[in-house]
Amino acid sequence: MAAQMTDGHRRFLQVLMSHGIMEGSVARTLHKDCCEIHKVYYAHDKLDDFISVVNLHLQPLFMQIRKGMSEDDGRTYYALVNLAETEITKMASDYTENELELFRKTMDLIILSESGFASSTNILNLADQLKTKKMKKKEAEQVLQNLVQDKWLSERDGEYTLHTRCIMEMEQYILNNYQDLARKCNICRSLAIQSQICETCGIGMHLPCAGKYFKAQTEPHCPHCNEFWPHEIPEINRPDSQLSSSASTERRGPSASGTRRR
Amino acid sequence: MAGPRRSQGPGPSQAEDASGEPCALGQRHLQRLAPAHVDQKVSELVQYLLVKDQKKIPIRRADILKNIIKDYKGVYSEIIKRASRTLQQVTMVFGLQLVEIDTKHHIYILVSNLPRLEGEDLKQDDSTAKLGLLTVILSFLFMKGNAAKESAVWEMLRRLRIDPGMRHEVFGDVKKLVTEEFVRQKYLEYNRIPHTDPPEFEFQWGARAAKETSKMQILRFVAKIQSKDPEAWSTQYNEAAAEVTATGGLFQDTRPLGDTGGASQGARRRNRSAHSQPERPVS
C-alpha cells in the first residue's frame, strides 16, 4: 500500500496518543472527523485501512496502532503500542526504578492469580520488600493511583488487574516472560488475564469469548474435554452495558462483531 | 520487529570494563555492538520524548543523558545524529516538531504542526478546564502589556470566583496550579520583581504558551468574549499583527490554545457554567 500520510491521519494519531486507548465507536467518530476536517477520502467502514496507512509509517519507529478487546465488556479498543517486545520502555520513561519493580511484582500477582486480580493489601505488602529501594505504603498507594490514571492498571472494589491498554501493549512481553504461567483464551487464542477455567482440563476463556461461544446453550460444555462448564455464562448485551454474570432481562440482539483480538 | 534487550540498570555493559569506564578494548566492542544498540537507544529516546510531552513536561538534555543515553555516552553523538533522522520520521507521521525552548539549558517540547481548530476534544475535561483557566490568565497578561503582578492576577481570578486562597472544586489548589504546574509546563513564567521587599512576583507568558498559541489568537479570544473587534485595542492589535508577520503568518485560525487539548468553545461554555464565571474576563 503506497498510501500517504495526510493531516487527517496525523490528527487521528495525535488524538489517539493523547488518550492512550480509545473505544471502537469513539475511534470511528474520530476517523470521520479527521477525514472531514482535512478533506481526506472517507469511507465509514474503512477505519482499519486508514489505520494500516498510519501503521506503515509507524513501523520504522517501532510503534503500531493495535486493535484489541476489553476483557470486561468485549468491546473493541484501539491503542498506540510499542513493538519492542522485551522491555516496558513506555513506562520506563515515566516511573522510577522501584516504581517499575512494584509494577512488575503487581503484574506477577495478577498473572499468577486465579481471578486475574490482586488485592491492594497484597500489593502494598510488596512495598517494603522491593530490592531496588523500599517504599512506604503511602507511597505505594500513590504509585498505584498513578498506574490506574495512566491506564496500566484498572481497579475494582479494591482489587487491581491489568488495564486493557496494558494488555494490548504488553501481551508479547507477558507471553515471553511468563510463558506457560500466562493463560491464553481457548477461543480467540490471545492472552487472558481474567478468565473462566475448565476445572477438568484446565483450558481458559475470556468472559466475553465464553459469552459468545456459549450463547443460547442451555447446557454449556467445555470445547476441549466436553465436561460440563461450571461457570455462569456472561450475557452478551448491548456493547455499552457492562457484562454481568447475573441474568439480565434485556437481550437486545446479536453481540457486536469485531470482538476478536488480533 | 523487536528492539534488542535494554540493559537493566547499573552494572557494566558489554562496552565497558568492570569499573564501568570505557576502555580501549571497550571502545572496540562498542564499535562492534554500536549499530543495533544505537538504534535501540534512538527508539527509547523517541518514546521518552513522546511520553514526557504527553504530560506537558519539558524535556531536558540533561535528563536524556541520564535516563536514556546512560552507559552509551561514548556514542552519544551517533545517537543524536540518528535521532534527528528518526525525529524527521516522527514529524512526518505524527505532525509533531521538536522545538528547543531554552537554548542555554537545552530544553525541548513537542509542538504540533497541524492546523488548529475550534471545538477539538483531545483530552479529558480536567485538562480542558485547566487550559481554559490558562487561556484566561494568558489573555489577562497580554492585555496588561505582557506582564502582570501576581496580586493583579489573583484579583482578576477572584472576580471570576476562583480564589487562590481557597480550594477550588475543579482546580483544587489554584495557587499551586498556576505558580507551579503551569510554570513547570512552561506555560507561564513566575519571576521575582527585583528590588521588592517583601519580594513580589510577576507573571509572563512562558515559552510553551508562545509556541502553542499566539498574541493574535489570544486577542481574538478576548474580542469574542467582549463582543468587540480585535482592532478595538490598537496597541495589542498592532503587537499581535507584528508577531504574525514575524512568524510568517503561521497561526491563522481562531482557537486560542493547544495542540493536545484546548479551550474549545464547548469547554469555555462548560467552564462558565461549572464555575459560574461572568461573561467577560476583566481586561
Image (tube, coloured by chain):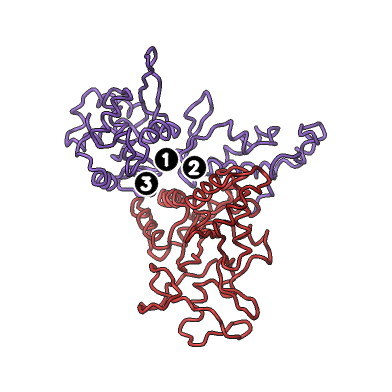
Left or right: A217, with A223 as reference point: left
Q: Which residue carries the number 1 mark?
A: B113
Q: Position of residue A22 (x, y in %)?
A: 44, 57
Instruction: Give the alpha-carbon distance from disc 1 to disc 2, as whole Å.
Output: 8 Å
For label 2, the residue is B91
Disc nearest the viewer among 3 and 1: 3
Could you say which is closer to the camera, residue A218 or residue B107? A218
Asked if disc 1 and disc 2 are in contact, CB closer than 8 Å, the reply is yes
* Amino acid carrying mark 1 in the image: Asn
User: In the figure, B200 relative to B210: above or below?
Assistant: above
Question: What shade does chain B have?
Answer: purple
Q: Which residue is mark 3?
A: B126
Q: Do the numbered discs 3 and 1 sit on residues whose CB atoms are within 8 Å? A: no
Q: Is residue B190 above or below residue A167?
A: above
Q: Pointer 2 indicates a residue of which chain?
A: B
Front disc: 3 or 2:
3
Residue A186 showing in the rendered view: yes
